Image: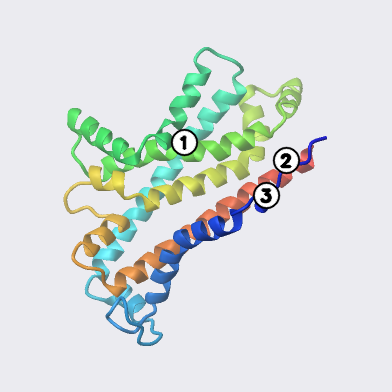
Amino acid sequence: MRKQLDQRYFPGFLPIACLCLFLLYAPLIIVMVYSFNDSTSITSWQGFSLRWYKDVFFGVEAAKFKSAAANSFVIAIAAATVATFIATLAATGMLRAGAFKGRSLSFALINLPIMVPEIVTAVATLIFFSAIGLTPGYLTILIAHIVFCIPFAYLPIAARMQGIDGSFEQAALDLYATRFEAFRYVLLPLMAPGILSGYLLAFIISLDDFIITNFVKGAGIETLPTAIFGSVKRGIQPNIMAISTLLLVVSVVLVTLSWLVGRSGQRLENDQQ
C-alpha cells in the first residue's frame, strides 16, 4: 500500500504558503486597522477612533452610501432568490431526471459563467441589453446578477442532492405519492441545507459584484461597490476604509454561514449512511 503524500513536508511549502497568505490578507488587515485611525491621513496612525464609522452613517456622503447599500441588498436578495430557485430546478433536472441527450453540454453551460472572465461577461451582457433595446437600470442589474449567480447557487445544491440516496424518493413513490409530492415532502427537506448554502453564496456574490454592475447600471443608479469605486476615484478617504471593513465583515459572516450550513448538510448525509 502506497504511503499517502503529505504536501506540508515538501521543501519550500511552508514559506510559500505563508507568503501567499500574507499577500492575500495583509491588505485587508491594513484597511481594517486604518479604518479605526483618528487621523484624516491614510498612512499615519494618530490613535484609535470610531469617527469614520460615524461618518459613514451620519457624514456628508451618508445619504449616498445608505441609498447604494439599500440598492445592493434589495438586488442581492431578489437575484439570490430567483437564482436559487432556477438552480434548484436545474439540479433536480440534471440529477434526478436520469440520463438524457445533451446532459454534459447542459452542465457545461450552467457552469460557464464561473469560467468566463467577468469582464467578458459584463461586455457581452451590455451588448445584449443594447441589442434588445433594454434601458440600463435596476432591471438590467437584476437580470445580469441572476444569470451570474445561478452557477454559484447550483454547485452546493447539486452537491447536496448527489449525497441524497434515491431510495427515499422511491419509497415515497411506492407509497403512492406523486412525483411532485415525493419532491416536496421528501427530497426538498433533505436538500434544504444545500439550498440555503447556495442562496447565501449567491447573495454574497451579488452583493459584492462590481464589474458587471458597473457596465449594466443606469446613470444615477449606484450599488455599494460602485459607490465605493466612485469615491475612490476622487481620492482614498478614511471613511472608504470604514465602509470596506463593514462590507468585508458582512461577506465573511455570510460565507461562514454558507460553510456551516453546508457542513451541517454533510453531517446529515453521513448520518443517513
* For marks 3 and 2 on the same chain, the one whose residue lies earlier in the sequence: 3
Q: Label 3, secondary structure: give it.
A: helix
Rendered image: mark on residue 77: none
Report the residue that reaches farthest toward the right: 1
Q: Earlier in the sequence, mark 3 or mark 1?
A: 1
**For the residues marked 3 and 2, what is the alpha-carbon distance in whole angstroms?**
9 Å
Label 3 amino acid? Answer: Ser
Classed neighbour count for the residue bearing mark 3: other residues with Cα under 10 Å, few (<14), some (14–19), many (≥20)? some
The structure residue drawn at horizontal position 66% and vertical position 52%, both measured from the top left corner, is 8
Secondary element at image label 2: helix
Q: Tell me: 225 left or right of 256.
A: left
Identify which residue, 85 or 25, lies in the foreground. 25
Q: Position of residue 59 (x, y in %)?
A: 26, 76
Find disc 2 in the rendering and name its residue.
Answer: 269
From where the camera sits, is residue 57 visible?
yes
Q: Earlier in the sequence, mark 2 or mark 1?
A: 1
Amino acid type assigned to the residue bearing label 2 in the image: Glu
**Residue, x 50% and y 25% (percent of image)?**
107
Q: Residue at x 18, y 28 (%)?
A: 131
Residue 250 in view in this figure: no
Give the image quarter of residue 149: top left
For residue 222, what is the image quadrant? bottom left
Secondary structure type for disc 1: helix
Q: Quadrant of the N terminus?
A: top right
Picture disc at residue 264: 3
Spot the residue most to the front.
11
* The one of 1 and 54 positioned closer to us in this rendering: 1
Counting other residues with Cα less than 10 Å from the Cα at mark 2, is it few (<14), some (14-19), or many (20 or more)?
some
The residue drawn where x is 44% and y is 49% is 203
Residue 171, percent from left and from top: 76, 25
